Image (cartoon, rainbow, N blue to C red):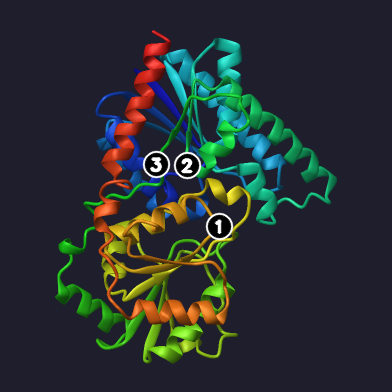
Amino acid sequence: MNILYLSYDGMTDPLGQSQVLPYLTGLAKQHFITLISFEKEERSKNYDSIRNQIKNSGIEWIPLDYHKSPPVISTLYDVSILWKAVTNVRKNKTIHFVHCRSYITALIGLRLKKKFRIPFLFDMRGFWADERVEGGLWNLSNPLYRIVYNRFKAWEKEFIVNADEIVTLTNAGCKEVMSWKLNDSITVIPCCVDDVLFNPLSIDSESGEKLRFELGIGLNEFVLTYSGSLGTWYLLDEMMEFYAVLRKRVPPAKFLILTSESIDFSHWSWNNEIIVRQVRREEMPLYLSISNASLFFIKPTYSKKGSSATKMAELMAMNIPFVTNSGWGDVEEILSNESGGLLISSLNESSFAKAVNDLIHPLPASRPLATNYFSLTRGINLYGQVYARIEKRNS
């Protein structure tokens, strides 16, 4: 099949490298894939290596320039550019179906379905419009954002009604969509992990000791890590409060934060104990391997019931104990198993102290769950099954 894959996230973004390309590389062994994505100028240093990776996978890549401002107008402009690119693809090849990653690209999928009867897969990820509001990106007291929000909520229903197949990240998100009684062709595929790359057995102790030395971390110091973005959904203040409790309980300790974002930690009195590094995806397992534990707190809102944290799967694959909070995605369901994770329901000092005490004792190995439920191979197979159903239904 000729599949057109549309992503508003860039392949030079960390998200594209961890949650798009690994799947497409596997799927490209069975299908002809044309990928259109939006690339950010600040990520251009990664462009050549990503281009070569995509080319070697047999995927045809059409990168487009991402526009950030002015808000709303820039997105509408990008949608128009995307439609032109899709039109050019249609002139040169038959598109058997279009795989739309999230809501912006689903606008194109919906149009292709209505205008040309091309099947489309709505890979909705989370509840995007509600995420924008709850994350403070769209203030509904602003008439413009209120109009945009209402329009996208209406489109959301159209996407679901017209999609040949729907993919959600969580069982909680699936149940929510099913309750709307619009379409029951829904598959749950969580954010998966490349358990070959994220494998503690592939990292030798000498490499870990060398990295500790380079970072200025003593061999006996407790290392708490955080990996990924620190933007809209992650509760940095609460995570810093957790570290404050931990550093009193298990001194000496360091907080290693692996992120591409620029964050000012100078207002924290212990900022000299915080180490911030930007690392490539292939380096992440080594940096995580020196962790004694990891941490991430996510805002427990309505839209977050549709969220699956890539970092959680990566930590499980590395057998690193971690602490997170309840109220998002399928976290309660997942951590009810022997997962190596600690779940706290209240973000306060007493809960933090209890979790710290639990962390200093051995926790169950979490890699077996990661290599089963969160494995990249399983994710590729599930997408392959979705693709096969679309092909059968439209053959």
Give the alpha-carbon distance from disc 1 to disc 3, as whole Å. 26 Å
Q: Secondary structure at mark 1?
A: loop
Q: In this rendering, is residue 394 above or below 143?
A: above
Q: Residue at x 33, y 62 (%)?
A: 315
Front position in the image: 124 or 97: 124
Q: Residue at x 46, y 20 (%)?
A: 89
SS category of the residue bearing label 3: loop
Q: Is residue 295 left or right of residue 216?
A: right
Rendered location of residue 390, percent (x, y): 41, 18
Mark nearest the camera among 1 and 3 is 1
Identify the residue position indicated by label 2 in the image.
171
Which badge, 2 or 3, is on the more N-terminal residue? 3
The single residue placed furthest to the front in the displayed view is: 336
Residue type at mark 2: give it. Asn
| Closer to the camera in the image, 59 or 138 | 138
Q: Position of residue 380 (x, y in %)?
A: 31, 36
Is residue 158 in view?
Answer: yes
- In front of the other: label 2 or label 3? 2
Badge 3 local density, few (<14 within 10 Å), some, or many (20+)?
some
Q: Which residue is mark 1?
A: 327
Q: Is 284 placed above or below 43 here? A: below
The reply to whether dot 2 and dot 3 touch (C-beta < 8 Å) is no
Looking at the rendered structure, the kind of residue marked 3 is Val
Amino acid type, residue under disc 1 in the picture: Gly
Number of disc labels: 3
Going from N to C along the chain, the mark reached first, 1 or 3, is: 3
Q: Which mark is residue 20?
A: 3
Horizontally, residue 182 falls left or right of residue 389, namely right
Q: Are marks 2 and 1 in contact (CB under 8 Å)?
A: no
Residue 125: give its label. none
Camera-side residue of 163 and 188: 188
Residue displayed at 79% across by 49% down: 140
